[in-house]
Image (tube, helix red, strand yellow):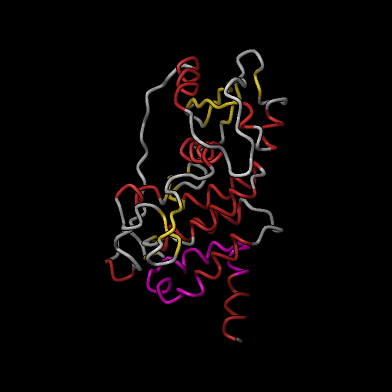
Amino acid sequence: MFGSSRARCSKDSFSRNRAGKSTKQKRSFRGAATLRSKVEKAIQCSPIKGQASPTMTSAIITLCVGPDQRLFAAHEDVLCHSPFFQAACRGQFFDSTSQRIDLPDEEPEIFSSVLEYLYKGDYYPRLEFDKGRNQWQLEDGDGGARAAAESTVYHNAAGGLVLKDTVIYCTAERYALPELKRLALRKQGLQSGIQCSTILSSARYAYAHTPDSDSKLRAHYLALIVRSRATFKRSGTMQMEMELGGRLFFDLFVAMSNHIVS
């Protein structure tokens, strides 16, 4: 699923076809009125499976996301599938005069994927079933450039690259969207060609942004590191990370001990 540091040769990588780095794209700033107009005209897709279709006459909410105040727009009925946004539309984050919600701590790229999920029930790269192989895979599963670029995001809070599905999982936890959590975890298991340093930074992020009661994502990282311990040893990254300490490495010690005993 991953390789060693970016500076090392490709022998420490499980796949050379699925690179991990994403590029930040700047978009032009558009006013709320333009966004509302685009939403009304362009959103003709299906909502989350099992949910009633949103009414296109429901209020359009403008969302101001991230430190650069990127603007998004969505129907109130769609947003309110999330208990977080149900409360936000009535709480201190909501400006009733302009029908705006400010989310200064969110990453625009991640929020865009969450919004795509709320409307379509999935986000790029979407899950596809390969009948020939009788298995699920991500679209562009042949190692397409766009899929490779989408596997990681630069996260300001983490100060580096983090797996996109991990951040989406943690965001879904905060927004109380359990189906999105399951989808993000499943997609993460299908990623490959991710660097060791990115795996460890993503694991730290997962531990920092999930409660102790939610062990699924944490267990995913522990099992991954145990299975691929030889690659981590070669990477030279593990020692530096372990010196930083934290709950992640205590759990990893327990998992490694259990693995040796069994």
Q: Where is residue 202 in the image (x, y as percent from the top left)?
A: 50, 56
Magenta-span inclusion, residue 249? yes
Up/down of 84 relative to 28, above or below: below
Residue 91 appears left or right of 198: right
Magenta-span inclusion, residue 247? yes
Between 66 and 75, the residue placed more toward the observer is 75
Query: Which residue appears at 66% of the width and 26% of the height?
Result: 93
Query: Which residue appears at 54% of the width and 40% of the height?
Result: 114
Q: Position of residue 4 (x, y in %)?
A: 37, 65
In which quadrant of the rendered image does the C terminus lie? bottom right
Between 118 and 257, the residue placed more toward the observer is 118
Q: Where is residue 57 in the image (x, y as percent from the top left)?
A: 60, 20
Residue 242 appears left or right of 179: left
Q: Where is residue 214 in the image (x, y as percent from the top left)?
A: 67, 58
Between 87 and 21, the residue placed more toward the observer is 87
Residues in magenta, as a range: 225-251
